[in-house]
Amino acid sequence: MDRIIPKIAICPSHELAEGQYRKLKMRFEGREDECLLLRFDGKVYAYINRCVHMPRRLDCEQQTVFDHTGRFLRCSMHGIVYTPQTGASISTMCEGEQLRAVEVYEEGGEVGFADFRVTGFSC
């Protein structure tokens, strides 16, 4: 039997512009966490805001999660770089490791969570 995944609306699609991100406090797998919701190359992605190198937020030392080119996600503490499309690290130190993805949807002009591990969120 297929599991029905509840959808949790976050925001209208137009409120998440290309190259922008939002940070959301969320309940993920039963504990409080922070999520990055971002739009890159027209698609919406979401990741737990925690570097794979050390358990720190990507923006722990700077107020951004994108690098200076806007093409990669970057941890401000040690400079570990990730692809926005997969969350995979392309830095030598953590190559191949991935940010923890959160399932999202975009349909009917709305962006939201479609992940059974999410039980609530706040902006």
Image (cartoon, helix red, strand yellow):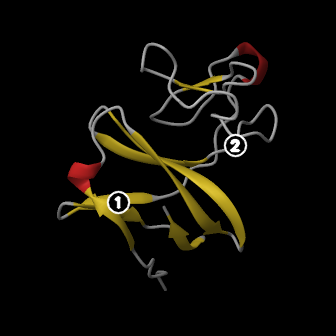
The residue depicted at 60 percent of the width and 31 percent of the height is 88
Instruction: Report the disc number at residue 50.
Output: 2
Which residue position holds label 1?
Answer: 105
**Which residue is more in the foreground, 121 or 86?**
121
Left or right of 31, for residue 43 = left
Q: Which label's residue is closer to the chain start, 2 or 1?
A: 2
Q: Percent position (x, y) of residue 104? A: 42, 58
Q: Residues within 10 Å of mark 2 (few under 14, many from 20)?
A: many
Instruction: Report the disc number at residue 71.
Output: none
Can residue 88 be seen at all in this image of the molecule? yes
**Amino acid type indicated by mark 1:** Tyr
Q: Percent position (x, y) of residue 73? A: 54, 28
Q: Residues within 10 Å of mark 1 (few under 14, many from 20)?
A: some
Left or right of 70, for residue 54 = right
The residue depicted at 43 percent of the width and 20 percent of the height is 71
Q: CA distance from mark 2 to mark 1?
A: 21 Å
Is disc 2 placed on a helix, strand or loop?
loop
- Please tell me in which quadrant of the rendered image residue 90 appears: top right
**Which residue is more in the foreground, 113 or 96?**
113
Left or right of 56, for residue 119 = left
- Please tell me in which quadrant of the rendered image residue 96 appears: top right
**Amino acid type indicated by mark 2:** Arg
Left or right of 21, for residue 30 = right
Vertical comparison of 52 with 113: above or below:
above
Q: Percent position (x, y) of residue 122? A: 51, 67
